[in-house]
Structure formats: structure tokens, C-alpha cells
Image (cartoon, coloured by chain):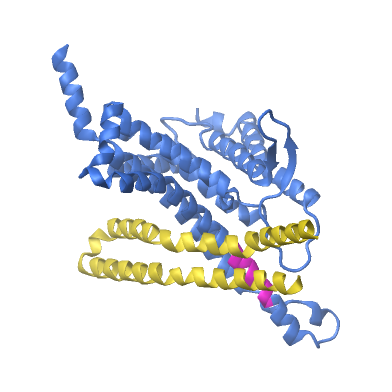
Chain colours: A blue, B yellow
Amino acid sequence: MNENRYSAKFKAVDALLITLMILPIIFGMMLYVLFTPPAEGIAIEGSRIFFTINMPLQPLPITESQVNSWIVIVSVFFLCLYLTHGLSATHPTKRQHIVEWGIEQTKKLVSDNMGEFFDSFAPFVAAIMVLSAFSSLLTLVGLYPPTSDLNVVGGWALLVFVLITYYKCKCGFLHYVKSFAEPVAFLTPLNLIGEIATPVSMAFRHYGNILSGSVISVLVAAALQTLSSMIFGRLPGFLGEFPFLQIGLPAVLSVYFDIFSGLLQAFIFAMLTMLYIASGFPEEDYKEKLKRQAASH
Amino acid sequence: MELAIGIILGCCALGAGLAMIAGIGPGIGEGNAVAKACEAIGRQPESRSAVTTTMLMGCAVAETTGLYALVIAILLLFLAPGRLVNILVETMNTLG
């Protein structure tokens, strides 16, 4: 087993997986370079529409955010294959330790926040977290982050909303309808609004944070460029054109907005997913229902 | 015509600015949350990770109103002017 890991075949598969992991990102950068029209000055744009497919009901536009989401999905898929390549019980590799640590942390997080009943939710939560984090980190290679498109995050929030409703319906549909009239009947409209506000606020929170980060970064960069051309514009030749003030500050902002904020939002989205699903699920009623079913049989 | 477009653009910018007044609320709220979390960590340093996680969650929820305002401000800045100017131009064309 041990010598197998250093064989040429193992290394070749590793190299292939890493290449397949990086290729989609290079593909995305090529698309970006080929399809971006040259912009003058400050440009804050939504995701570009590459082409439109004619569908029966309504034309379906294929946007940059969709393409970039698929890039992230394929990349993360090969990253997972790379990390789980060559698993062994007796001689764990470095990457196996990393993977095991990650899985243990996720399981602990899920069981801490959701309780025993939802132990099987760990892969789902991990998938949401990883997808969101890598989508936000896509700005680091200069691509459009899919999470700054409301449609993408809205889709995720809708998925979470369906899950919340499914687990609320676990005790029967009537129980679900009745739960809106609690604690008193006249609060029903408020409860309905609160129910709808859950996915809306989740989507807006994630999208607003990422989008505001990129907008602020672009504005600061543009302001610094104007300022430096005002101050150093009189200098001759190359010195006059070089934006000296743009060194430094945009990088610090990028560390906060792109890395910290992106990862934090991924974590918060996953946490809120867990909390909403777990808190919507009527656990005690469900246990009673199970008991009654067991007694009747 | 130019005056009308100018008024539209100016009012959109003003509206975006006014919408962001809502940023005060989450600022104060999150400040309170972080202050209390610091106190809690100071009292019980061993509960640091749990307090931090809860605080981040609370901050995220408290931020929601501010983000609603932010979304409205962004719509007003980047989407509304074009739409409104288009509507204005169309009405002017139909009126002659």
C-alpha cells in the first residue's frame, strides 16, 4: 500500500485531477477575456448574458453567473476527487487528515445545531457551505462571483425554504397549517409574512454582502486612481500615468470583502439553513406521532 | 427634457442616500452585540468559540434591515435611473 502511493500511476492520476480542477477556472478566465467589451472608467455591471435559448414559455438566458456556478461545481467536484484519492485506513496521507478534520468539524457543527434527528444533514450543509465559499472566492481570479447575483442565491434560499416546509409538514399537512395560528389566531398574517421573509432575507443577506463588497472595492479603486492622477499627473512620462495610490489599500479591502466576507457569508448561510430547518421541525409532536403509530400497530 | 432627466437622476441619488440612513440601526445593534460578546468572553474566556459563533449569527440577523436598505439603494442607483428615463422618453415620444 505504502509504495503504491509513490508509484508513477498514482502521481499521474493526482496530476490529472489537479489539471481538471484548474481547467474550468482557466476556461472561465478565457471566456471573460474573450467576451468582455473594453470598459471605460468605472464599470459596475450585473452578470453578462452570453446567449439566449428559446424555450416554450420564455427565452432562457445563459448568464455569466450560471456559467461561473458550473465552473465552481466542476472545480469542487475534482477537488473532492483529488482529496479523497488514495484513502487508506493504515497509512493516511496529509490530505486525508485534512478531509477527516473537515468532515468531523461539519458533523459536530450539524449535530450541535440541529440535534440528533438531522445527523444526515451534514453532507447537504457542507455542500452549501463549500459551494457558497468557492463562489465568493471566485473574485480572487477576477471572475464574476455567482453569489453576487440575486438569482443564484435566491435559488439556494428557495431550496432551503422547500426543505423547511417539508420538515414542518412531517406531522401532517393539517399540523403545518395549524402552526400558523399559534400562539393566537389573529397573528396568522404576521406568521405568513414571517414565513415568506425567511428565504427573502437569506437571499438578500448573502447577495447584498457580496455585491456591496465588490461595489465598494470598485468605487475605492476608481477614487484612488482619480486622486493619484490629480496628485502625480504632472510628473513626466511613466511616473505620471502610474496610479501610485492604488498600491496597498485595494488589497486590504479585497482581503476583507473578498476573503473574510465571502467565507463569513458562506458560514452564516449554512448556519441559518441549519437553524431554520431545525427550529421549524416540530420534534416533540413528531415523536408523539411516532409513539402513537407504534402503539396502534 | 434635460431638466426632467436631471431631476430623475438627482432624485434617484437622493433616494439612495436617504435609504442608507437605515444603516444606523444595524450599526448600533451590532455594536451592542459585539460589546456584550466581549464582556461575556472577558468573564468566561473558555466559552469564547460558542460566544463568537452566536455573536456572528446575531450580527447577521441584525444586519438584515440594513441590507434591505442597501439593496434598495443599489436598485435606485444602478437600475431605476435607466428605467425611469426610458419611461420618460417613451411618454414624450407618444405625446409627440
Q: Which quadrant would residue A79 be assigned to in this image?
A: top right
Q: At 86% across and 81% down in the image, what residue appears?
A: A237
Residue nearest the viewer, comparing A207 with A189: A189
Q: Is residue A291 left or right of residue A155?
A: left
x and y percent of residue A119 in the render?
32, 34
Q: At 80% across and 78% down in the image, what residue appears?
A: A241
Count every numbered label the image shows and give the total.
0
Residue furthest out toward the right: A237
Q: Is residue A186 left or right of residue A18?
A: left
Q: Main secondary structure of the magenta part?
A: helix
x and y percent of residue A189 in the render?
33, 46
Q: Which quadrant would residue B87 be assigned to in this image?
A: bottom right
Q: Is residue A13 magenta-colored?
A: no
x and y percent of residue B95 in the render?
77, 59
- The magenta stretch spans which residues? A214-224
Q: At 25% across and 40% down in the image, what residue appears?
A: A181
A17 is higher (above) or lower (below) than A212: above
B51 is higher (above) or lower (below) than B23: above
